[in-house]
Amino acid sequence: MLLGTRLGYGVRALYELALSPERRSAVRDLAQLCGTTEAVLRRILLDLRAAGYLEAQKGRMGGFRLIKDPQAIKIADVARVLEREPVLALGGLRRDALRLEPDCPTYPFWQALEEKFLGELAQATLADVIALASTAERPPAPPRGQAKVKRARRTARKPRAKGRTRRSRR
């Protein structure tokens, strides 16, 4: 069972937008809450806007806002918008999928699991996500502005010889 990161980030962004439906949220703030970069989330949000879930406004007071009722947003529909490949990949539809053949003894188990998952996904709405999130116990989130965002590692520099600076080499 493979879930794409685009679906995960997209549902999280929709969740955050649904919590404050009257307010526009900046990509920067949403990216911090989702734990991803602005560039990645911006592409996801633009796809959701093109599908009619969001409206966007440019400028200082701009941002994204949810325009559909959370009860009307099916997670399966969001998956179709955001995932280029199927959400589940039984039989090798994705590059990194486990390739199972129908004659494999475990194939019926995975097939039944996939059917159940897709059935649940077709019924689940954003309102269900919000309801479950409000009752789930979670560790406290870091204060706003301090969310962990993955950063690229810097490569170590060679130590310079004593007395040498970049300018002294010229």
Image: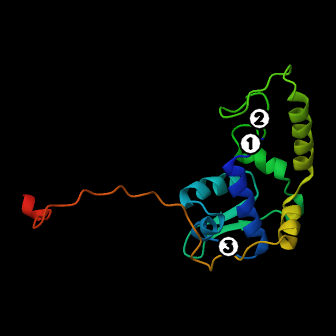
Residue 2: mark in rendering: 1
The picture places residue 83, in percent across and down from the top left corner, at 71, 43
Is residue 25 at all visible to an observer of this figure? yes
Q: In the rendered view, tell whether residue 119 sits above or below residue 134.
A: above
The picture places residue 117, in percent across and down from the top left corner, at 88, 44
Say if mark 3 contacts mark 1, CB within 8 Å: no
| Residue at position x 87%, y 48% in the image | 121
Say if mark 2 contacts mark 1, CB within 8 Å: yes
Image quarter of the C terminus? bottom left
Q: Check disc 2: other Cα within 10 Å, few if <14, some if 14-19, many if 20+.
A: some
| Residue at position x 88%, y 43% in the image | 118
- Looking at the image, is mark 3 or mark 1 earlier in the sequence? 1
Q: Amino acid at mark 2?
A: Ala
Residue placed under numbered mark 3 in the picture: 24
SS for callout 3: loop
Of all residues, the one furthest to the bottom in this rendering is 143
Q: Nearer the viewer, residue 115 or 40?
A: 115
- Looking at the image, is mark 3 or mark 2 earlier in the sequence? 3
The picture places residue 159, in percent across and down from the top left corner, at 22, 60
Q: Amino acid at mark 1?
A: Leu
On the picture, is 37 further left or further right than 131?
Answer: left
The picture places residue 63, in percent across and down from the top left corner, at 63, 69
SS for callout 1: loop
Q: Nearer the viewer, residue 95 or 25?
A: 95
Q: Quadrant of residue 52?
A: bottom right
Q: Amino acid at mark 3?
A: Arg
Q: Quadrant of residue 57?
A: bottom right
Residue 17: mark in rendering: none
Residue placed under numbered mark 2 in the picture: 89
Indicate which label's residue lies in the foreground, 3 or 2.
2
| Residue at position x 8%, y 58% in the image | 169
- Looking at the image, is mark 2 or mark 1 earlier in the sequence? 1
